[in-house]
Image (spheres, coloured by chain):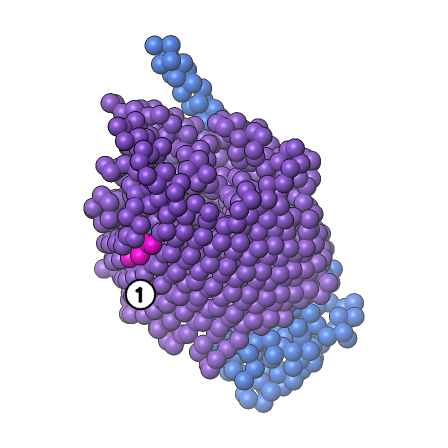
Amino acid sequence: MALQLIVRRGLSQGACAALLLLLPSAPSAAAELADLSLEQLSEVVVSSVSRREERLDRSAASVVVISGEDIRRSGATTLPEALRLAPQLNVARADANQYAISARGFNNVLANKMLVLIDGRTLYTPLFSGVFWQDQDTMLEDIDRIEVVSGPGAALWGTNAVNGLIHIITRHAARTQGAAAFAHVGNQQRVVAMRFGGTAGERTHYRVYAKAYHRLDTERISGESVNDASTGAQAGWRADWEQGPRSLTLQGDLYRVETGEQGAVRRTAGGNLLGRWGQAFEAGARLTVQAYLEHSELRTPAFEEDLDTLDLLAQYDFSTSPRNRIVLGVGHRVAWDDTRNGPTLAFLPAKRTLRWSRLFAQDQFTFDEHLSLGLAASVEHNPYTGAEVLPSARLSWTPVTRRTVWAAASRAVRAPSRIDRDLFAPAQAPFQLAGGPQFESEVAKVLELGYRAQPSVALSYSVTLFRQDYRRLRSVVITPVGLQFDNGLRGTTQGVEASMSWRVNERWRLVAGGTSLKKRIELEPGGSDVGGEASLGNDPSHWWSLRSTVDLTPRLIWDATMRRSGRLPSPHVPAYTEVDMRLAWSLTPEHELALNLRNLTDPHHAEWGPAGNRVEFGRAIALQFRWRL
Amino acid sequence: MNGLSAYSVERRDRLRTGTRVLLALMLCVPAGRASGADEEPAREAAVKAAYVYRLSSYVSWPAPQRASSGPLVIGTLNAPDVHDELLQLLPGRKVEGRDIELRSLREDEAPAGAHLIFVGRGASPKPATWQKLAKSPGLLVVTEQPDGLAQGGAINFVRVAGRVRFEAAPDAAERNGVKLSARLLAVAERVALAP
C-alpha cells in the first residue's frame, strides 16, 4: 500500500510563477501614505539606515509574502489552505488531510524538492525529504507571515530547497497579548483554538495556545466514503525576552493526530523545543544561535517510526563597509531514526543515525544605489553522498525607484533520503522495489530573470521567467534482485510566474497571480526507467487565481477568490475552477462572525489521484467565530 | 525525427506564449510617473502623519464623542513637521463619514474637544500637562518620545529597522474611555500592559 503510494502518487509541482507582492514601498507623499493600512505603514522604509536589511521589493528572487491578515481574511484553517494564497505554489488536495504542494513542478503528496520551515525549524522527514502536511499545524491566528520563495534557496538554506522555500513565521509574543479564541463549524470540519498571551516581568512576553480539530470523511464520485476522517490536537507556547541588544526566544509544541487511511488508522504524535539567542553588536553586526530538539512517532499499518532530531545553527551577519554585507553560518543536524518494519515495507538498517553538517556564506555587495550583487554558497555534508556544493549568484538592478530587474543563477541538489537508499518492499527478497545502493543526489541548475515594479502606491506586480535543468532524477531500473531506484532521468521545467496587487480604492483590493509551466522529462544518456517518471510529479501546465477583498463598511468585509488549475496529465485529473467567498461581520472590534463558502460554482471536483479512486470535493459551508481581547 | 521537430514546434509555441504573457503583463500597467514623485526614503513625519490619520479608524471613542456629529478633532503639540504633513494629507478625507479638523495646540491650552493629540518629540510637557492629557475623557494621546508610554501616552511611535512602528498601551487609552481595536494591537510592535 505504502509502496504504491510511493511509486504512484508523486509528483510534481509545478511551478512558478506568479506572485503577488504587495510590498509596501516608500511613497514619499503623506497623501499617498494615508491610503495604506496600518500593516503596510509599518513596513514603509523611512531610512536608508536599514540598508543591511534587504527590502523585498529589491530582492533578487521570486518572493511572495502571505501576511497574517491575508490568512485570516481567507478563512483558511490549515497551513496547506493558507499556502493557496501564494500564486507560485501548486497546492492539490488529495483527501481530507493529504496535500501535494510544490513550486515549479514535481508536485506529489511525497513532493521532495521544497524546504519548509516554521520559525526556523525544518518540517522535513528524512524518510522522503518532504513534508507530511497532515501532521503540521500551528495557531493560524498567530502567524505573522509566510514567506514563499520559488526557485532554489539552497545556497543559504541547504539541500532540498531546490524548487522553493516556504518559511512560516509566527508573531513575537509581545504581539499576541491577551486572550483570543477561534471556532470553525462546517460541513467538512470543526476547529476550535484558543490562545492566551501575557507578560512575566518587564522584559518577557509569552503566549500559550491549544487547538483541536475534527475533519469528516471525504467521498469518491460514487458517494462511497474514503474513511479518511481525522482528529487532531495541538498545544504550544512561545516566550520572547529582550534586553537592549540581546534577545532570547523559546518555543515548543506538542501534537497528536489520528487519521483514517483506507480502513486503517495512522497515528502520529510528537513535540519540539526550540531556543534562539540573538545578540546585536556595533555597526549592525548580529549573532544568532539556534538549537532545537524534535521527537515524532509515526504508526501506520505498514511500518512504525520513532524519530529524534537535534539541530544546531549559528549565524553571524556583519558589514565590512556600508556597501558590503556578509553572512557566515554553520549548521549541524543529527537524526536518530528508528523504524519497526512490517512484512510489506522495510527501511534497512532499521535504526540509523543520520548527520548533516553545513557551512554557508553570503556576500551582498552594493555597487551604487542602482546595482547590487549577492554571492552565496553552502557546502553541505550528508550521510549518503558526502559533500555537496550549492552556489548562487544574484544580481539586481534598480534603474528607477521601485522598478527592479534581477537575474540569478544557482545550483541546488536534493540529497538522497531513506526512501532512495534504504527502502525494501516487500521486506524480504525478491523485492518489488528497493532503494538504490548507488543512488546519488538529484541536481538542478537554475536560471531566473525577474522584473518587479510598483508604478504607483496602489499597484505592484512581479514577473519571473525561470528555467530549471535537472540531472540524475530518480528512475526505477530492473536489476537481478528486483526493481531499484537509480538516477536515470533528466529533465527541464521552464515557465513564467506572475503576480499583481492593485488597491482599486481605499476599500477594495484585487490580487491576481499565476504560473505557466512546461515540463519535459527524458532518459539520461545510457539510463533506463521502468516507471520512475510517474513519481516525478503530476503537474498542470498552468494555474492562476484572482482574489478580491472589499471592506463594504468598517464592520463588514467581503472576500472572494477564484482559482483555476489546469488538467493534470498522468493520472489524468480534469482542470477545475473554484470560487470561494467569505463574508465577515465585526459585531464589536473584538468579535467577528464569518460565513465561509467554498466551491460555490461546482458541485464537486477532484484535485489529485486516479479516476475512480480519488476524492471529489463538494461545496463547503462553515461559520467562523473569532474573538480577541 | 518527427518527435524532434514536434518538440521544436512546441518550444517555439511555448516561447511565443511566454512572450505574449509577459507583454500583456507589462502593458497592463501604466508606465512610469514623473521621477520627482518617487523620492525615497519616505519622510518619517509623513509616515507618522499617515498613521495619525489611520489610527482614528482603529479606535472607538466613548459614547458622547461617538454620538457627536461634529468633526473629528486632531490636535498637535510641538510637532510642526507632522502638523505640516497632516495639512497636506487631510483635505478631502473623512473618518467614518466625519470631517476632520486639525488644530495646533499650545502646552498651556486645554485640549478641549480634541479626540486625538499628537505630542511631538520637540515637546517636553510638564508632569502636570501629562496628567491633564492622561485624564481627558475621550482623548487618545499619541507620542513620539523615548518613554512616551511611561509618561501616559496610549500610542508611541518608535523606529525599528528603518521603519516607523508603534507601541500601544490599551489601559492608558481605556482610562480616557478610548478603546484600541484588536487589529490595531495586532500591528503594534509592543503592547504594554498595566503595571
Point out residue B127 in the picture as x, y percentages from the top left corner. 55, 89
Chain displayed in purple: A
Q: Is residue B39 left or right of residue A361?
A: right
Q: Is residue A177 left or right of residue A424?
A: right
Q: Is residue B179 above or below residue A559?
A: below
Residue at point 39% right, 60% down?
A295
Q: Is residue A61 above or below residue B140?
A: above
Q: Quadrant of residue A566?
A: top right
Task: Name the outermost residue toward the left.
Answer: A386
Colour that chain B carries in the picture:
blue
Of B127 and A236, which appears nearest the observer? A236
The chain to which mark 1 is attached is A
Residue at point 43% right, 53% down?
A298
Of A139 and A394, which appears nearest the observer? A139
- Callout 1 crowding tier (Cα within 10 Å): few <14, some 14–19, many ≥20: some
Residue at point 36% right, 67% down?
A276
Q: Quadrant of residue A580?
A: top right
Q: Tell me the residue that label 1 is attached to.
A: A289
Point out residue B71 in the picture as x, y percentages from the top left corner. 73, 67
**Magenta run includes residue A522:** no
Q: Main secondary structure of the magenta part?
A: strand
Image: magenta residue range: A334-338
Q: Is residue A575 left or right of residue A477?
A: right
**Magenta run includes residue A335:** yes
